[in-house]
Image (cartoon, rainbow, N blue to C red):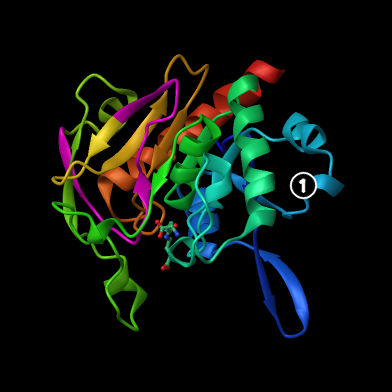
Amino acid sequence: MPHAPILVAVPADVRDFERYRWHASPDTYLNALTRVAAATPIIVPAIAEEIDIDLILDRVDGVLTTGSASNVHPALYGSEPDPTFEPYDTARDALTQRLIQASVARGIPLICICRGHQELNVAFGGTLATEIQEIAGRMDHRAITHDDQRERYATRHEVALSGDGPLAAIVGQSSIRVNSLHRQAIDRLGNGLAVEARAPDGTIEAVSVKGAQSFALGLQWHPEYWAESDAPSAAIFRAFGDACRRYRQSRG
Ligand SMILES: N[C@@H](CCC(=O)NCCCC(=O)O)C(=O)O
């Protein structure tokens, strides 16, 4: 029986090349949505002031915020801009902050990956630390330098899952190995968020929204990349797709 078609909004990154400004998302997230979550992704352009975000949210069944090499602008969490926080994508920030807050308020299933995880924390009033590999006692969470994406996205370290949280219930394990491609991380946890996983050095690797009406998780690692072959990654995307189907059914 084919699943009811579900739409998942994916806010775009902004990139300038070939004389144009492009709004785009990596296909790894799109493929995980279509092939594992059984969802249809809809890329939302990062022109927040020019589009009706409520119109979009009236029509979608989930939201996925992707990873990106860009960083959330520090002014959004009370820090001064600094070259170590660059590159920015303020157009994406403007869209994702609104999408995240509205999705949680409406009970629309939400999965926030890497930069998206950091955006979720900022949307809930939290802060970020940058260049965490330079902080005493912290691991180096950056991607390795390699031409092969499969090597860059290879699993790098364990994370311990909070036993009583929604993520551990989805994954069915107390610890998993994850990939790692980031130089920023949650510093002060946002109000109303719960820690769902930590790296051995204490880095917050996953969060959930306390009391969320539906699936509402932030993940610092990248389950989308191995979603077709890695059991925990597949479980996360299947659970997200199922939450989107339940939401759609609840909408009538
Ligand atoms: N820029 C942030 C978030 C990192 C992130 O989303 N990485 C995704 C993969 C990017 C790549 O392919 O290098 C940070 O650095 O913490």
Q: Nearer the viewer, residue 237 or 120?
A: 120
Q: Residues within 10 Å of mark 1 (few under 14, many from 20)?
A: some
Going by the numbered disc 1, the residue's amino acid type is: Ala
Considering only vertical position in the picture, is 13 above or below 200? below
Q: Is residue 62 above or below residue 181?
A: above
Residue 190 drawn in magenta = yes
User: How far across and down, in percent of the image, does residue 217 sit?
Assistant: 43, 33
Q: Nearer the viewer, residue 1 or 206?
A: 206
214 to the left or right of 55: left
Ligand 1 sits in quadrant: bottom left
Q: Which residue is mark 1?
A: 48
Screen quadrant of the N terminus? top right
Kindly identify the residue that appears in the image at 54 percent across and 64 percent down: 26
Q: Quadrant of residue 188?
A: top left
In this orientation, does residue 235 appear? yes
Percent x, y of residue 24: 65, 64
- Is residue 208 highlighted in magenta? no
Say whether residue 99 is left or right of residue 246.
right
Measuring 57% from the left and 47% from the top, which residue is drawn there? 75
Q: Residue furthest front?
A: 80
Q: Is mark 1 within 8 Å of ligand 1?
A: no
Q: Is residue 33 above or below residue 207?
A: below
- Find the magenta span and give its range: 174-195
Quadrant housing residue 45: bottom right
Q: Residue at x 40, y 28 (%)?
A: 208
Q: Nearer the viewer, residue 56 or 187?
A: 187
Q: Position of residue 235 (x, y in %)?
A: 34, 39
Indicate the position of residue 6 as horizontal and vertical percent values: 64, 37
**On-image quarter of the C terminus:** top right
Side of 209 relative to 194 (left or right): right
